[in-house]
Amino acid sequence: MGRNASGIYIIDEDYNVVSYNRTAAKIYPGLKKGEKCYKCVMNNDRPCSECPVLNKIEGPKTYLDSVRKILASVDAVETELWNHKRGYAMVVSVVADSERLSDTIMGKNDDLRFLGVINVLGSDYCNIYSVNRKDRSVQIYRFRGHAMGVKEALDRNNDYETAVGAYIEQNVLSEDQGKLRQALAFENACQRLTGASQFTVHYRVKRDGEIHYFYVKCVRVGEAENFESIVFAFANEDSDVQRYEMEGLLEPEGTAGRRKVLVVEDNELNREILCELLKKDFDVLTAEKGEEGLKLLSEYYRYISAVLLDVCMPVCDGFEFLERIKDDTLLSSIPVIVTTGSNKQEDEERCLELGAVDFVTKPYNRRIVIARLNSVIKFRESAAVLSAVEYDELTGLYTKQAFLHHAKTLIRYRSNQEISFIVADVRNFKWINSVYGEKTGDNVLVYIGQQLRKYIRGGLISRYGSDQYVCAVYGEHDSFFEDIDEKVKSISADAPVPNLVINYGIYCNIDKSLPVTLICDRAFLAMKSIQDDYERRVAFYDEEMSCKHIRDRMLENDFEAAVANNEFVAYFQPKYDVKTEKIAGAEALVRWIKPDGTMIFPGEFIPLYEKDGLIVKLDECMFRQVCSIQKQRIEHGEKIIPISVNLSRASLHYRGMVEKYVEIVKDTGIPFSAVPIELTETAALYNTKIKELTEKLVQAGFQLHMDDFGSGYSSLTSLDMLPFNVLKLDKSLVDFINHDRGRQVIRHTIALAHGLGMKVLAEGVEEKEQKETLKKLDSDEIQGFYYSRPLPYSEFEKLYMEI
């Protein structure tokens, strides 16, 4: 899949557009379902000559989009459509890595001058825009799709200030937003560029829970007196860091005998004074600028015992230095002493808040400087602290924090090599601790670490969780994959306990543009795919998982728009009274109907939304729909019949759920009995909090139905513990009703439920013989295809009126 993927659209074998996400629609506004992709994307009357489907190209294809004046990368991933026919997921990204941009620039003199500026800036800048000084119109020269705000605002024809404001609001860390707003205010930028041809502003961005360091370079196009435009170029500061060879970082040769101190001081005289004061007792590394100091600290953190940091420096001052190491577990463990000539108490307080451990004032007193250095080093010996942070105490492997730190560096340094991630997870490790004791459990964990070291002689190995391991291998170190099944069997066979089961997930040739945590997630996704498979031990993250991952992301991306557009619709499956064979109620079941009339069935999106929490909003959406329908029936003078609504486990855990649902019922003015709530037994059982919630629902006036009884490990205890009004027999029980043993189970379950004051509803009834038997066994209600499939409300109402 192409790097920096920012849009996805699906086509069938005849190039007809089947579906697309919002990002693809922004890149190609002409996308329309049912239309030929080459028509609505490129205004062609035949397939595009660059099309990877037409040319059977494996991997991304970069081409010049002459319509939008951009360089685009398109990858075609074969996938199966809903009708089981073959289709393609077209993954699109707007790129400008090392490609020449001259083809995308018009031939005018001004544009050639822009090209000159962009070429000077180089290829490390992820986004480049130019702003005309007269009308403040914006032209995008490069956009990689990571940042949200600017391009979206410009697509809506907003002005420069609105676009920049949107970018800052959606991306920049709140502490840096004020600084960046002031620097990028257009008049302020113009004023600064009259005195200098360019300036740079550093700031931080938070993405996927991680802090990333960025800067924007502002360059004028023309002379100071009469320049007409400004180029704004944004770059990820991490990609600029130049380091020594990766092996030197990961496999250090050892430290010198004396402790090392890093001095970060922009004043040459002060720097020389400190070096002279310290050289007798320490090895001294020096940095003239904060940025240089950060690089040295990142490279030599293993050896540096303390940092002497000047507060007042240009570009990256002491405050920013402390701020930037604060969120890195390894770097922030090294003590920092701030050197300052200021007596301001607020500066001292701010430095302490950011992690500084002590202060020394200028001019320097040698005895005081040495004493304070020795004090902080003795109190917080860097080697011990780093060992605790960097290495797992039990296995001696990297900790999770250290692995994430080193893996990021590995990916950056091995950008031209294939890198693969391997995860390992011990199945039922808690059982090992319980049966054999924690000491044996520890021995198992140590043993696995030793075996991974044995088979993976290079790369990175980490104890990622209590019983999980993550490895990153590259180049000649990927020999682990040779005879991998034999290696896996050997590890389990020689383990300290018999029948040790370890599942492995492997993500080969990783997408290096992804955050390390997401790369790990993909390997774990592969591993989880075989959790319930007792035959397989190794699974690879493959194209099928990739396609499902793409499909899942599309379903997640489209959720909010689908809710806003009322695409989630309630269908109603009637519930029939066994004796009268008349409709006694219904169950509301969600269907997703797209604007073009195609339907996405619940089995595709419900499990996904249960995992990511979107099910809570979907549950509420369905509940509101049913309440609204019941309100309409009351207003039209129609008879109210109970329509039950399903509530997921996630919704039960949602804070304030009971109060919200009570408020919805009261606002619509319907009786609580009009909307019974269905809960699966597994969602409600063995949880004190859930038991309290179900009791609150009953106290509020709701009736509760126990759904899917008999589908799993049903417990008779649940019939007594939880306040249900109706017991729903699962289809898996009903299917065996014509067998003697199955019939006896249902007979006694119905009798028990009636004895506890509960009605019984049998679901999944498809045959007349099943219906007749349930009638004889005294079931109260029946639901299933024998009577009716789930119906749109208009058809359900018509059916109800006919009976």
Image (cartoon, helix red, strand yellow):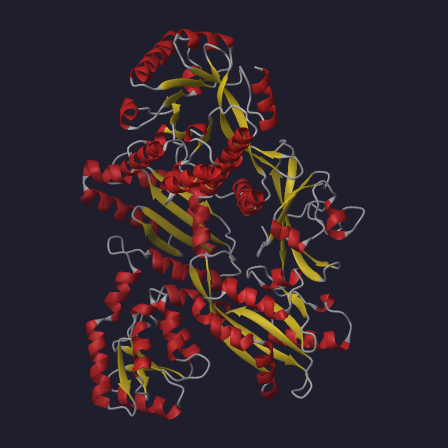
- Residue 244 lies, with reference to residue 651, above or below; the image says below
State which quadrant residue 675 falls in.
top left
- Please, which residue is most extreme toward the right here? 45
In the shown orientation, is residue 526 left or right of residue 264?
A: right
- Residue 346 lies, with reference to residue 420, above or below; the image says below
- Residue 314 lies, with reference to residue 48, above or below; the image says below
In the shown orientation, is residue 264 left or right of residue 552?
A: left
Q: Position of residue 87 (x, y in %)?
A: 65, 39
- Identify which residue is drawn at 49% across, 25% down: 640
- Identify which residue is drawn at 56% across, 19% down: 800
Q: Position of residue 116 (x, y in %)?
A: 68, 76
In the shown orientation, is residue 779 left or right of residue 4?
A: left
Name the one closer to the observer, 231 or 264.
231
Q: Position of residue 142 (x, y in %)?
A: 64, 65
Name the one closer to the observer, 498 or 565.
565
Q: Position of residue 320 (x, y in %)?
A: 40, 75
State which quadrant residue 794 falls in.
top right
Residue 608 visible in this rendered orientation of the protein: no
| Figure disc tally | 0
Residue 25 visible in this rendered orientation of the protein: yes
- Identify which residue is drawn at 40% across, 71% down: 324
In the shown orientation, is residue 66 left or right of residue 22?
A: right
- Residue 442 lies, with reference to residue 137, above or below; the image says above
**Which quadrant would the C terminus be assigned to in this image?**
top right
